[in-house]
Image (cartoon, grey):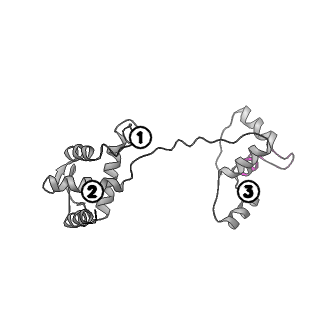
Amino acid sequence: MRNIEIDEEVYQALFKLAKSFEDTPNDVLRRLLGIDGRYEEQIIQKGKRDYEQPLKNLISSMNLEYKISKNRIKITPLEDYYVPILETLVELGGTGKVEQILQRVFEKMKDKFTEDDLKDVPSGVDVRWRKCAQWARFKLIQMGLISKTSPRGIWEITSEGKDYLDKTEKDL
C-alpha cells in the first residue's frame, strides 16, 4: 500500500463524499475512480473500463456540467511519409544523411502538413513533422524497407524498399 499526502481542502471534500462510519478516504477515491466492486461488475458486462464514467455520474448527480477538454492535435499520418522518404533515398543514390533527407521530405510534403505538424513538440527540441518523419523511418525499418544496420545519422533504402516504392508508384 502506498501513502499519499493531501491537503486539508481535498480531505474535507473527500469527507463530504464519504458514507459516514463506512468509508475511508481510499474507499471514496475508489468509488470516484470507478474501481469499487459495483463498477467492476459493470466492466465485466461491458468488456472495457471507462475511467471517466464514474466522474460523469458523480458530477451529474450533483447537477453540474461535465466537460473535459480534449486538445487533440491533427497531424499527417506516418504512412504518408513512407513514399517521400523512400523516393528521397532513391534520388540520393540509396543512402543519405538525416538532415539532407528531412529537407527533401519537407519539400515533398509541405503542402500536406497541418498547422500542428509545423509546431514544435512539447519539449521544444524539434518540429513535430520532423519527429514524425523519424518515427516513419522507424516503421520503415521494422517493415524491412530501410536498413537497420546503417551507421548513425545515415538512412539507407533496402532492395525491399525499392520494390515497395516501385509497386506503390505503379498503383498510383
> Which quadrant would residue 121 be assigned to in this image?
top left
Residue type at the position of mark 1: Asp
Image quarter hosting the C terminus? bottom left
Q: Nearer the viewer, mark 3 or mark 1?
A: 1
| Residue to which mark 1 is pinned | 116
| Residue to which mark 2 is pinned | 83
Residue type at the position of mark 2: Val
Mark 2 or mark 1, which is nearer the start of the sequence? 2
Callout 2: few (<14), some (14-19), or many (20+) C-alpha neighbours within 10 Å? some
Q: Secondary structure at mark 2?
A: helix
Q: Is residue 88 left or right of residue 132?
A: left
Q: Secondary structure at mark 1?
A: loop
- Residue stretch in magenta: 18-30
Q: Residue at x 59, y 40 (%)?
A: 69
- The location of residue 92, given as percent across then percent down, is 14, 52
Q: Which numbered circle lies on residue 36?
A: 3
Q: Secondary structure at mark 3?
A: loop
Rounded to the nearest angstrom, the CA distance separating label 2 from label 3 is 49 Å
Mark 1 or mark 3, which is nearer the start of the sequence? 3
Residue farthest to the front? 172
Residue farthest to the right? 21
Q: Judge by depth and name the residue closer to the eye, 98 or 3.
A: 98
Residue 131 shows in the view: yes
Rounded to the nearest angstrom, the CA distance separating label 1 from label 2 is 21 Å
* Mark 1–mark 2 CB contact (< 8 Å): no
Callout 3: few (<14), some (14-19), or many (20+) C-alpha neighbours within 10 Å? some
Rounded to the nearest angstrom, the CA distance separating label 3 from label 1 is 39 Å
Residue type at the position of mark 3: Asp
